[in-house]
Amino acid sequence: MQFLGWATLIPWAAAALLVGAVSRDWRQALAAGVAYGFVLGFAFTAFAYAGADPVLGKVPFFAILGVVSAGFGAALSLAGWRLSTRVRPKSEAG
């Protein structure tokens, strides 16, 4: 597989910001960002794997990359939530 380049991270980062922006609160943004980042990182590395060794033996490595991706997903999702709280009109307490 050919290296896709750093530019492919831009839509993934924008999606993580959007995940946070549509979240109700910071906890939901955090959980959704972690899930988004882990699944994206794990799936991308697993499906892009083209090595000679069996893919099942590489799952721990893919999981480690998924955890790293989860951290970035969480950070960007929380940033998206924070930005959206500055843009949204404040709702009145009923």
Image: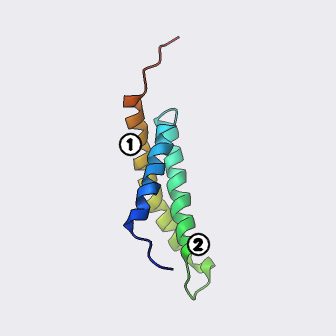
27 shown above or below 6: above
Which three-letter amino acid code belongs to the residue tagged 1? Ala
Residue 71 visible in image: no
For badge 2, the amino acid type reads Phe
Say few, some or many: other residues with alpha carbon within 10 Å of mark 2 (under 14 / 14 to 19 / 20 or more). Answer: few
Above or below — where is 66 with respect to 74? below
Residues marked 2 and 1 touching at CB (< 8 Å) = no
Residue 73 percent across, percent down from the top left: 45, 52
Identify the residue shown where x is 61% and y is 79%: 55
- Residue at the spot of label 2: 47
Name the residue at the top extreme: 94
Residue at 42% across, 34% down: 84
SS at mark 2 in the image:
helix
Q: Which residue has dot 1 on it?
A: 79
Left or right, 55 with respect to 45, comes to right
Please say which color scheme the image uses.
Answer: rainbow
Q: Quadrant of residue 39?
A: bottom right
Q: At 47% across and 49% down in the image, what residue appears?
A: 16
Residue in the image at 48% along x and 50% along y = 15
Checking the image for residue 28, the label placed there is none
Q: What is the CA distance from the residue labelled 2 to the residue labelled 1?
A: 28 Å
Residue 50 position, x and y percent, is 56, 82
Disc 1: CA contacts within 10 A as few (<14), some (14-19) or many (>=20):
many
Q: Nearer the viewer, residue 40 or 57?
A: 40
Q: Residue 24: percent from the left, percent from the top? A: 52, 32
Which SS class for mark 1?
helix
Q: Position of residue 76 (x, y in %)?
A: 41, 48
Q: Earlier in the sequence, mark 2 or mark 1?
A: 2
Q: Is residue 13 visible?
A: yes
Above/below status of 55 relative to 26: below
Q: Is residue 21 above or below residue 46?
A: above
In depth, the one of 53 and 50 nearer the eye is 50
